[in-house]
Amino acid sequence: MKMALKSSPVIFGWLSRLPRHFSTSSALAAKPMTVRDALNSAIDEEMERDDKVFILGEEVAQYDGAYKVTRGLWKKYGDKRVIDTPITEIGFAGIAVGAAFAGLKPICEFMTFNFSMQAIDHIINSAAKTFYMSAGALPVPIVFRGPNGAAAGVAAQHSQCFAAWYSHCLLKAAVRSSDPVVVLEDEILYGVPFPMSDEALDSNFVVPIGKAKVEREGKHITLVCAGRGTDTALNAAKELAGSAGIECEVINLRSIRPLDFDTIARSISKTHHLVTVEQGWPQSGIGAEICARVMESPSFFELDAPVWRVTGADVPMPYARALEVNALPRHTDVIAAVNADKCSK
Amino acid sequence: MSKIIPSVAKLLAGNTVTKVGAPVATTSSAKYSTKSEASFEIKPFKLHKLEKGPATTATLTREDALKLYEQLAILRRIETASGNLYREKIIRGFCHLYSGQEAVAVGMRAAMRDVDTVITAYRCHGWTYLMGASVLGVLSELTGRRTGVSRGKGGSMHLYAKNFYGGNGIVGAQVPLGAGIGFAHKYKGDGGVNFALYGDGAANQGQLFEAYNMAKLWDLPCVFVCENNGYGMGTSMERSSASTDYYSRGDYIPGIWVDGMDVLATREATKFCIDWCTSGKGPLVMEMETYRYSGHSMSDPGTSYRTRDEIQEVRQTRDPITSYKDKILSNELATPDQLKEIDAKVRQEVDDATKQAKVEPEIGVEELAGDIYVDCIDPVIRGVIPSAPLQHISVAQRN
């Protein structure tokens, strides 16, 4: 359960306090304790230790918690520190983050993490990014917690794991849905003209969902990319062909989900080397997904070297020009990755 | 748009309440003003669920008169400089100017105490200055340089200062955050009041109503300040809002409509709000009717959804600086020479800061992974490729 223990607005990370309750080395802990009780006593201890800690959420006080995690806390600490909120997630998540801005240490409970989607703007944009954007002037010591993951018999809206969503800490909307389709348009490319074939200009022309496009053929290494990463990869491929005689096969995914793994697999069996290129954060990103699929498939045996990912750096996007440039992959990074990959045997 | 024009007439009518002196140029030939204070009538406040509103007579001392004038002038000048820096392509990305709305921030600041706090949206350059940042701190944040209040990492929408919680780029998000800061005031019992500012566009965000509800439920010392400048981007308030009486949209929260072009009105209204909140009566909604001269941001010329005549008319009849200047001159709280001196000082200060903000260096690339976490458990942050990891550093703690 080491998910995002390093984050400052501690998402899940607060659970790191739990292990000592499970410790078997202490005589006290020999008595079994449920996770619920462990959570409860961890909250209790924290509230006792620091009067800046308070908990708010739906039904956390008088009802004793929808899942009884906060049982008894209201009776012990009263209205000031155990606060029932209305059923308004974005509102109370925002209030909790604002209180953290001002130096308190809120524990913001979501009755389940399914409902956190109503409040995700405050988790990502208000809590996770402010310390960085303020150059360290404004810490946001907050815990968002609540039940996550597949539950039993409650169907789609109430049963899902948000680990990948929040594992970025600063989740980027790498939303991939198949039926209602989300189209992510690259803002930077809005003004960039591309040559159009007669075929593409035809009113009947449709780019199929779920089909990748080989933008450039090559035999030495496969570059898999999406969105603006495609431009970066193509520039790198051009330079590598000229300077080093390395022919890259550049695959533009176009659609992230469904992911056209067949095209990737075919290319790997030809080139035996793979580098992925994307602008998003590395953790649980597109490259990570492709690596996982390679590991799970016969393509693994086709590789002559480990796969490398070229991604956005694992930081919030800075405003300063030089920092911004360094936060995003450039064609020189792809070249470095290709060279490293080709050299590692 | 139709609502703007009648309100101009109303405001003009309000202005006649003030003492009309002799023509400005002949008011006084003395270098320094002679009167120590004067009283002014304020255009009546409109009240929602309040029996009694703020005082409609304001007393202004000579010292305060000059101080307010200087602040109004410096805010205008900062925005002029920002606009120029943007046109020179030295400011990148977004840039939202406050010109026309200065009386809101300056009047509010004049009434605020050290313990009070502010959070606003992205039109935040002036507020940052008023809350204690230097002109250079503001302008070099806009140019993305080392001396910026956020070391160039935040840019124009993410400025911070003591008791000033930003600058927020997400329309409406600052409102529940502000209620949360108000919550902290109450929790800590420090007697402070939070002012959460938002525009007429953000006034329709669902999260505002969630924040209103909890603020009233818990009697938080928080004032929701709607800066109604008539347009949310290019959509006029009549096209966005089923009710344009923003001061009444808190329903069960009492509200006040304020002439946001009159720095004395905004000051008196804010004093009232502080008294209200500190006596434990809970939140208030305050609508400041104002106007923005520039487009929504620098990429908007601001003329496709309103007429140039409309902008011109506001400049000529309602400008918060010109009207205030006339007031203090005709009441002999200041002389033209004194104001000229202030103008020159302000120009010098902002020009110097502008020059400096252009030549300051950016922070080093080593700060790309600086201050992501207060306590970084895993000191190595992945960079763009696996062979180039970044080292997390704590710059704020080091400085």
Image (spheres, coloured by chain):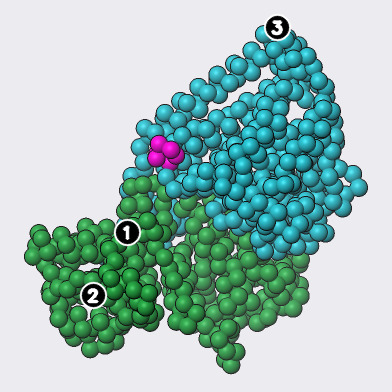
Chain colours: A green, B cyan
| Image coordinates for residue B180, horizontal then vertical, percent | 66, 57
Instruction: Describe the element under mark 3 as helix, strand or loop.
Output: loop
Mark 1 and mark 3: Cα distance apart in space: 64 Å
| Numbered range of the magenta stretch | B86-91
Residue B152 in the figure: left or right of residue A71:
left
Residue type, label 3 = Ser
Pinpoint the chain carrying mark 3.
B
Tell me the distance, in whole angstroms, between the alpha carbons under discs 1 and 2.
Answer: 20 Å
Indicate whether residue B377 is drawn in magenta. no
**In the rendered structure, which disc, 1 or 2, sits on the residue that comes first in sequence?**
1
Residue B112 visible to the viewer: no
User: Toward which corner of the image does residue A218 lie, by quadrant?
Assistant: bottom left
- The quadrant of the picture occupied by the C terminus of chain B is top left
Amino acid carrying mark 2 in the image: Val
Residue farthest to the top, as pictured? B29
- Judging by the rendered image, the residue that carries numbered circle 1 is A193
Badge 1 crowding class, 10 Å Cα cut-off, few under 14, some 14 to 19, many 20 or more, is few
**For residue A214, which numbered disc appears in the image?**
2
Nearer the observer: mark 3 or 2; the answer is 2
